[in-house]
Image: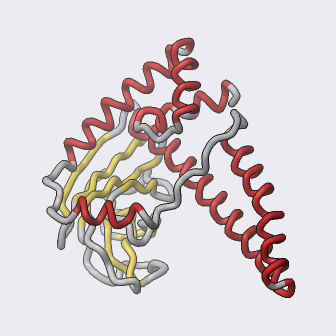
Amino acid sequence: MTGTDLHTLTGAYAVGALTRSEAEEFRRHMGRCEACAREVRELRETAARLALAVAEVPPAGLRHQVMSAVGGTRQLPPEVNVTPLRSARRLRWRRRLPYAAAAACLAVAGVAGGVAVDAQNQADSQHRQAVRAEQQATELSALTAAPDATFHTGALKGGGTATVVSSRALDRAAVLFHGLPALPRSQVYELWYSHHGTMVPAGLVAQGRSAGATVLTGSQAAADGVGITAEPHGGSTSPTSPPLALLPV
């Protein structure tokens, strides 16, 4: 991992999202880089503030839900070397695909090509998701650490809480949400910038997520608030129902 790569991992390290080897490498780097060490301290303080802002007693069934989800959650493969993270992912998939194709040929030679293409499509999709997640984490880290960052927390109608983090200097905003009630598969939570009553689409919350964070798309410079609504699957160009929450920026 290069020095430049290490500088971008402050947010992931602060919230414990690195693998053991990456965390050890970053700790060595942090011992030599006061800027990264200071940013980690600030991000941990911010994370603690956000946790207090949305803290609530966990529901009785939470542990059971978590344990039930463990079996269906994809785990990271074991590390075999110190190849950079992105390169390692590409390398692992390059190694897997020939074996997958060979196995398919032994089973049903006629569908081997289709299996290989499907595996490649899945690899590409997972890579894109990883890139988006990394980008969101980097943007959220910069946003929460901005000197002019503001935090506004409120309850959603129907359950759950949301915190809007915004920075005029960065011209960005994000929503941290917790305890969102599950929606039917035909609906999705949508985020909006409010421009004096006019709602402008600003992104969707990933379906099925009850807690997490989403960096809003577009500029927040002229916005005076951020709204959350429940919309048909895929989102809407304008709200189809009153906001579940409308928080200032």
The N terminus lies in quadrant: top right
Which quadrant holds residue 186? bottom left
Residue toward you, 149 or 212: 212
In the rendered view, would you say 143 is above or below 219? above
Color theme of the render: secondary structure
Which quadrant holds residue 244? bottom left
Residue 238 placement (x, y as % from top left): 41, 79
Q: Looking at the image, which residue is at 49% across and 45% down? A: 137
**Image side of residue 113 versus residue 167, left or right:** right
Q: Looking at the image, which residue is at 47% across and 36% down? A: 11
Residue toward you, 127 or 92: 92
Residue 217 placement (x, y as % from top left): 50, 59
Residue toward you, 221 or 163: 163
Number of labels in the image equals: 0
Residue 202 placement (x, y as % from top left): 45, 64
Q: Furthest-front residue in view? A: 106
**Image side of residue 247 versus residue 35, left or right:** left
In the rendered view, would you say 47 is above or below 201? above
Q: Looking at the image, which residue is at 40% across and 83% down? A: 185
**Image side of residue 136 versus residue 130, left or right:** left
In the rendered view, would you say 60 is above or below 42? below
Residue 157 placement (x, y as % from top left): 18, 70
